[in-house]
Amino acid sequence: MIALLCSVPLEAEALLASMNKEGPVDLGSLRFHRGTLSGREVVLCAGGMGKANAAHASTLLITRFSPAALITFGIGGAYPSSGARIGDLALASEEIAGDEGVLTTEGFQGAKFIGIPLVQTGLTQYHNHFPADKHLLDNARNTLPSSLPPGNIHTGKFVTLSTCTGTRSRALELEARYGALCENMEGSAAAQVAMLHDVPWLEVRGISNIVEDRDLKKWDIPRAAAAVQKAVHHILEAWRQ
């Protein structure tokens, strides 16, 4: 079974319409849809916006359904110098917890500055950076270019923030600090939970906007949501583990 996690129902409408559903499972306030999609057994949840909701939903997905992998998907905003455009796809090489750390007189310092890792597996410590599963990422990168127009797929670092960036100056600051491709509000929390449970994870997002001075008239959320759901279909069709 493969667990699928997004934040809001709009990001999952097409997938749910295509799923051969077995019936929903309600756990607390969340609904989990089990069934088959693109020939794979899946469980899908729209867990809500933000890190707390993503951590809650991914914990339930992993502990109640024991998936072989977790795919987080949805929309995201691309940083100005990323080269990504609205409607493009982005795959995470790693997720970065962009808020966890300390604001000092010399600027922001990550969790390593505090000396406490957010995840420790054996002797390996992870502070703000959570690498995606290389096998899943390589498979996705090899799958998607054959089914989508060239140049529409980007791979890079994702930043997860509690405060959505709404100014170009802040976007450039974050882009420079992390060398990141795009930002979102859930991904690092899901990645952190997956790593705590030793579950391989992958994240794919459709680009809904360029991160700049906020202007919703320039956004295209439906286009981004449609693109990422198409990508999830293709990833599942070519799934290898």
Image (cartoon, rainbow, N blue to C red):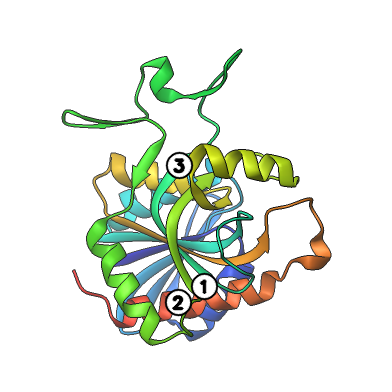
**Which residue is under mark 1?**
228
Label 3 element class: strand
Residues at circles 2 and 1 in contact by the CB criterion of under 8 Å? yes
239 relative to 162, above or below: below
Q: What residue type is labelled 3?
A: Ile
Q: Quadrant of the C terminus?
A: bottom left
81 left or right of 65 in image: right
Residue density around tag 1, few if under 14, some if 14–19, many if 20 or more, within 10 Å: many
The label on residue 231 is 2
Where residue 162 appears, x then y in whole percent? 62, 39
Q: Distance between the residues labelled 2 and 3?
A: 22 Å
Q: Quadrant of residue 81?
A: bottom right
Q: What residue type is labelled 2?
A: Ala
**Which residue is under mark 3?**
96
Dot placed on the residue nearer the N-terminal end, 2 or 3: 3
Q: Quadrant of the N terminus?
A: bottom left
Residue, far top: 105
- Residue shown at the point (52%, 72%) measured from the top left: 228
Where residue 22 appears, x then y in whole percent? 40, 77
